[in-house]
Image (spheres, helix red, strand yellow):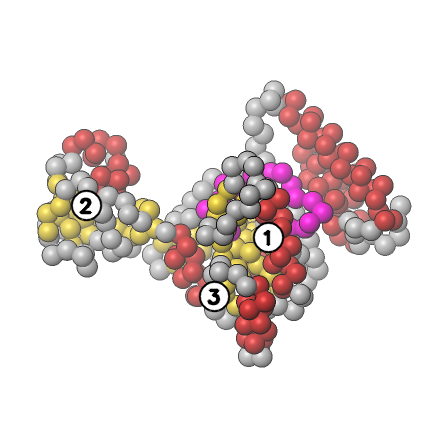
Amino acid sequence: MPADLPPVYLEAERRYREAKTPEAKLEALEEMLAVIPKHKGTDKLRADLRRRVSKFKDQAQKKKGGARQKTAYSIEKEGAAQVAVIGFPNTGKSSLVSILTNASPDVADFPHSTHRPTTGMAAYENIQFQLVDTPPVTKDYLDPAMADFIRRTDILVIMVDLEADPLRQFEDTMEVLESIRVFPEGVPVPDTVKKVPFIKRVLVVANKMDHSEDEETFEIFVELCGTTLPCVGMSTRTGKNMPVFLEKLYELSAVIRVYTKAPGKEPDLDQPFVVAKNSTLEDLAGKIHKDFVSKLKHAKIWGAAVRDGQMVQKDYVMQDGDIVEMHV
């Protein structure tokens, strides 16, 4: 066995030996494959790890009788949008999720401290976003379950470390996403992609902008990237630009907040209905209760685009902040 295996690999190997279930062994093996150094001396060991991962996955699939297996990435969506935070090891993903949510992911100064996804809710004004801290992305291996999760989630946050060649991290992460047919919204899909691509809203976050001089480093990174994707420079250590990060998530989520009221009553402005932009009054009615769609006659609207109390029909396109009084 190579003598230069990192401590995080040896710890995962210990968990593999002590694991009592196939699922636990598979999780440890996948971590070992993700963190093992990639060089000629580990070629045979990496091949053996891939073989064992495949073996345990096959066993799990047979045990389920061919049914779709639930994994740690079978995360039900909550809030205004589900946001997957992805990136290379030690970029600050866990710190970001820990600071903004009630989650407690493992936070450490060494790479690969996150072994499985951790979920928490981040508040933005009167709504919440579901942030999901994920294990590190590497070019050598990506858990198929994590790939499926990335395809399903609403927004991707690509996190890079300004102190550790952020351009390479960004380009390598984009390459990994392309390998699973995931492409940012607005970015052309290469003609070489034959299967249906997955188009995602993407935010690039450059972490560790801890000092004023780091702002220039961030600007250089953005210029060298040449990307049209929205980018935010921030610091999980000082809290710099955390509010900007949440504002960008709201912009990318493509949702609006709509409030309802009963006749003669005041609306509850702390509990909005969150619906997609360009939703109609009929869409909102269906979200409130399926019977509302057929029973709804009209509604009165208070908002920036109408007169207060203006009567509208089912095809009215709602605006952010509208207050709706439905009549059935």
Looking at the rendering, in which quadrant would you find the C terminus? Answer: top left
Residue 109 position in % (x across, y down): 68, 62
| Nearer the observer, 19 or 184 | 184
Judge whether residue 150 is colored magenta: yes
Judge whether residue 296 is colored magenta: no
**127 vs 234: above or below:** above
Q: Residues within 10 Å of mark 2 (few under 14, many from 20)?
A: some
The label nearer to you, 2 versus 3, is 2
Residue 11 position in % (x across, y down): 77, 49
Residue 316's disc number: 2
Q: Residue at x 73, y 35 (%)?
A: 53
Q: How far apart are marks 2 and 3 (CA)?
A: 35 Å
Residue 94 occupies quadrant: bottom right
Residue 265 position in % (x across, y down): 14, 51
Q: Earlier in the sequence, mark 1 or mark 3?
A: 1
Highlighted range, magenta:
137-156
Q: What residue is shown with label 1?
A: 174
Q: Residue at x 68, y 30 (%)?
A: 57
**214 vs 22: above or below:** below
Residue 143 occupies quadrant: top right
| Nearer the observer, 130 or 312 | 312
Q: Residue at x 67, y 66 (%)?
A: 164
Circles 1 and 2 in contact, beta carbons < 8 Å: no
The kind of secondary structure element at disc 3 is: helix
The label nearer to you, 1 versus 3, is 1
Q: What residue is shown with label 3?
A: 242
Left-right relation of 129 to 257:
right
Amino acid under label 2? Tyr
Q: Distance between the residues labelled 1 and 3?
A: 24 Å
Amino acid under label 3? Met
Q: Residue at x 49, y 59 (%)?
A: 229
**71 vs 130: above or below:** above
